[in-house]
Image (cartoon, rainbow, N blue to C red):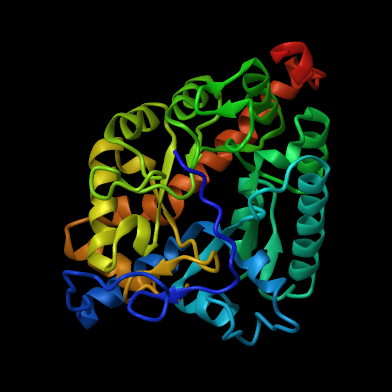
Amino acid sequence: MADLQDNSPTTTEVGQEDGLPDDPFPQEPCAPDEETLRRAHSLLAGHPVADGYSGLPWALRHLPWYDLQLGETAVDTDMPRMREGRVGALFWSLHLPEGLVGDRAVGATLEQLDFVHSVIGSHPDGLRLVRTAGQVIDARHHGRVAVVLGPAGAPALDDSLGILRILHALGLRLLTLAGTAWASEAGLTRFGEEVVREMNRLGVLVDLSGASEATVSRAAALSKTPVLCTRSGARALRPHPANLPDDLLAELGAAGGLCMVPLTAEQTGATVRDVADHLDHVRVVAGPDCVGLSGTYDSGAAHPRDLADASRYPHLIAELFRRGWSECELSLLTWGNVQRVLRSADFTARAAQHRREPSNARIAELDG
């Protein structure tokens, strides 16, 4: 599947000047009734959104000045809108522009990590850097949005497990396996498999959005921790190359993985109903334990009507209530499934570190 890395600093709502064609079959925006919207807010108060992909760090780097605590109109995500949208955790993307490889990719990723530490440090009343599932819960109890660092792109490793360990020590918790010779259309090489094992040992989650079908299948079977697809809808509904076909969705569900459906017009459609259709489909094919949300805000993507920024999650949850989703299923969708995956990664890493030494495998030795 094609890699998803659109890093322009701003996003737009469908129907604005975003360069996309108008929806040939426009629908009226889906406005939930007040009671259903109230139910959505009530559910999210107890089970906030764990957003699987935010491009905010890259977007902020293009701004001369910003204040996320008071509000920032130049981006889609700030503290007032996250409070309104009931966002409790964010995965902050460290993806880079296409074409950066080797030392340049490593250096740029380190700069990104330095920058996000600075952003979080300058917003202590709203944001908290977290490394474990327990820290996510603690941040929520203290009224902070938990920030999980990643996904980063596999080229940031420069084919070195030592660099993976350094990035992990700096806070990285999610890596996308795509864009390298060891995670290609042909699948994982022996070195690629060793990367997955070392990620399991460290507690770094495997992201497979944008990876080839062969890589998705092999990584899902190999990983001792559930894998994620942080930006993947259902290809049966929309034939985008980053969306997953039903057979891979079923494999992901059987492996306990998580498909995080993006709120983007290109992948999931122009309306709230279109996004809800993808969530319905993934729930049926992979199971309610294997579906999550990925705002994909501030990534340069155009968003469906009524889902223009991070404040709009209650409108999506209201639509799912209208479709008959139970409170239990919705609590898994918004918060529970991400917590399950994070807890599994923590447990697996603790167990593996007692029985497995850091790997010194080299790509030349395994794949040369």
Above or below, 49 relative to 162:
below
Report the front residue among 250 and 244: 244
Residue drawn 44% across and 38% down? Answer: 1
**Rendered residue at 51%/50% (across/down):** 4
Residue 279 position, x and y percent, is 29, 52
Q: Quadrant of residue 262?
A: bottom left
Q: Position of residue 150 (x, y in %)?
A: 64, 50
Observer able to see residue 142: no
Q: Residue at x 67, y 44 (%)?
A: 173
Q: Which one is nearer the viewer's eye here, 266 or 347? A: 266
The front one of 245 and 348 is 245
Q: Position of residue 345 (x, y in %)?
A: 60, 35
Is residue 99 at least partly visible in the picture? Answer: yes
User: Where does residue 277 sit, x and y in percent of width and height?
Assistant: 23, 55
Quarter occupied by residue 115: bottom right
Q: Is residue 85 left or right of residue 116?
A: left
- Depth order, front residue of 140/265: 265
Q: How many marks?
A: 0
Residue 54: quadrant of the picture:
bottom right
Q: Is residue 337 above or below residue 143?
A: above
Above/below status of 125 relative to 109: below
Compared across the picture, whether 244 is left or right of 66 comes to left
Residue occupying the point 35% across, 72% down: 314
- Image quarter in which the C terminus is found: top right
